[in-house]
Image (cartoon, rainbow, N blue to C red):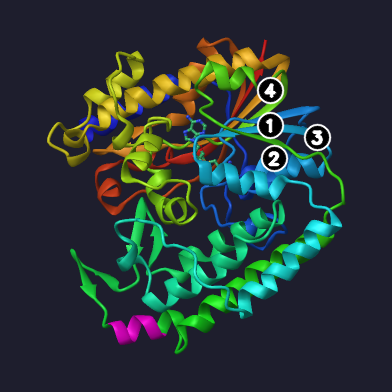
Amino acid sequence: MMQVAQANLEVVRRIAHPLPIRSAPAFEAAVNFSGSYKQPVHRWFRYREGFSPSMMNMIREGERVYDPFCGCGTALIEAARKQVTAVGTDVNPLAVFVAATKAADYSIKDRRLFAKFARLAGCEDWGRAQAPSMPLLPKLFLPAVLDELLRIRAVIDTADEPAQNLLKLAWLSILEDCSNVFKEGNGLKYRSKRRAVGKYLEIPASVWINRHFGSDVRAFVRNRWDEATQAISEDLKLRPLHWKSPKVIEGSCLDRDTVLGVGEVDTAIFSPPYANRFDYFEAFKVELWMGGFVSTPAELAKLRKTSMRNNLTVRGRTDYEVPELEELLELMDPQSTSVRMGIKQTLRGYFEDVQKLALNLQACLRPGGRSICVVGNSAYAGVLIPTDTICAMIFQKAGLNVETVDVARHLTVSPQQRRVMSGDLLADMRESVVICTRQ
Ligand SMILES: C[S@@+](CC[C@H](N)C(=O)[O-])C[C@H]1O[C@@H](n2cnc3c(N)ncnc32)[C@H](O)[C@@H]1O
């Protein structure tokens, strides 16, 4: 075990050696979304994997900003606030809808319409929208909660756009809280289960339902709805009547065709999926089905395949090899669960996608333009994968000049990984901002 750790550290240091790595605690708060839950507009939809709006205050962005992995649009909204032209791309139609709805321009009439329908949906009975044919639906919502949600939805569906989009966004934003599951780790966890050593225990329905929803589940849904629509109304009052609405494109930033539509860019600022097996389509499947973004399991499966290859469902074939990565993969225990499940191929695919991204950035950035990438490292089978420095190396090979790898903060690892990794390696578990210039 010591030998593996030593060899791991040697490769990690060799990759890092030529790179300008420095500690940058000023980025610490900027690389995570937690501070955004209370901020105007950003609080409209919880997207844990986003970075903080303050990220945009840490950079000189120039006149045209591009976020290739725009998620719920954090960078785009902040660019618009500064009157900067911004374009974003994302493969997840839910993320695209959230970003575009947050970013759109709303006239006084739209704002009034929104407020009127928000009130009606909370108190009048306009019938019930049709439930999606999601196989898990009965397990995901209590019958009375689902009924209340679909009654609100029926009213939303009669409103005109763009107010309807704002109403739908408010509705999507309360689904997690109104459901029997919550997002945790790499997926969804049931509120009715409690983790105990090595197993999950079932909590009696009378206990967990009362604890989460209180005694009146319909009132719970209506309160969440009122809070969500109230927040949107308040935040719209702070927004100028006309602003530079960012453009949001649904498509893969790894496709040359998508990127050609983006035009010439001064600053690309983004956070790609980390090589941590997180599946965005799994985590947001309730919202994807309920929002009508997918209507069959096959559609969801097809969407999953469009993602950057950071998880096992999008592994696919690849011949791409980075020699240093291969050295790290060699060190992994072949009997470990992650290796048996195919993590080596996932990581090769992931870095092949980083290379595609780098070539596309090279194509859309103007000479002297900058790429600012927030990314975190991971560990599998006791081996640390320094994603930040491998990305920097790939960016460099694609013709971008690496200015700095700014270490923003340290990340924790699972107890199993901590047992097998040495202290020196644990110090390299971190989130960094890789800053490059297009030559
Ligand atoms: C870390 S999140 C970005 C969050 C964003 N910075 C924000 O603040 O909301 C990564 C995003 O990349 C998207 N994504 C994954 N593969 C993609 C691809 N090939 N092209 C574009 N977006 C992709 C995911 O859907 C997810 O929204």
Q: Which residue is mark 1?
A: 87
Question: Which of the two discs, 1 and 3, sits closer to the camera?
Answer: 1
Say whether disc 4 or disc 3 marks the residue closer to the N-terminus.
3
Question: Which of the two discs, 4 and 1, sits closer to the camera?
Answer: 1
Report the amino acid beneath label 1: Val
Residue at mark 1 to residue at mark 3: CA–CA distance: 10 Å
Report the amino acid beneath label 2: Leu
Q: Is residue 224 left or right of residue 115?
A: left
Question: From the Cβ of disc 4, is ligand 1 less than 8 Å away?
Answer: no
Residue 315 spot, x, y in % from top left: 30, 29
Q: Which residue is mark 3?
A: 84
The residue stretch that appears in magenta: 205-210
Instruction: Provide the secondary structure element on which disc 3 rests.
Output: loop
Question: Residue 208 occupies which quadrant of the picture?
Answer: bottom left
Residue at mark 4 to residue at mark 2: CA–CA distance: 16 Å
Question: From the Cβ of disc 3, is ligand 1 less than 8 Å away?
Answer: no
**Other residues around mark 3 within 10 Å, as few (<14) / some (14–19) / many (≥20):** some
Q: Which residue is mark 4?
A: 370
Q: Is residue 5 visible?
A: yes
Say whether disc 1 or disc 2 marks the residue closer to the N-terminus.
2
Question: Residue 144 occupies which quadrant of the picture?
Answer: bottom left
Taking depth in this image into account, of 165 and 398 the one nearest to the observer is 165
Mark sitting on residue 427: none
Q: Is residue 51 visible?
A: no
For residue 53, above or below residue 24: below
Report the amino acid beneath label 3: Val
Residue 205 spot, x, y in % from top left: 29, 82
Q: Which residue is mark 2?
A: 76
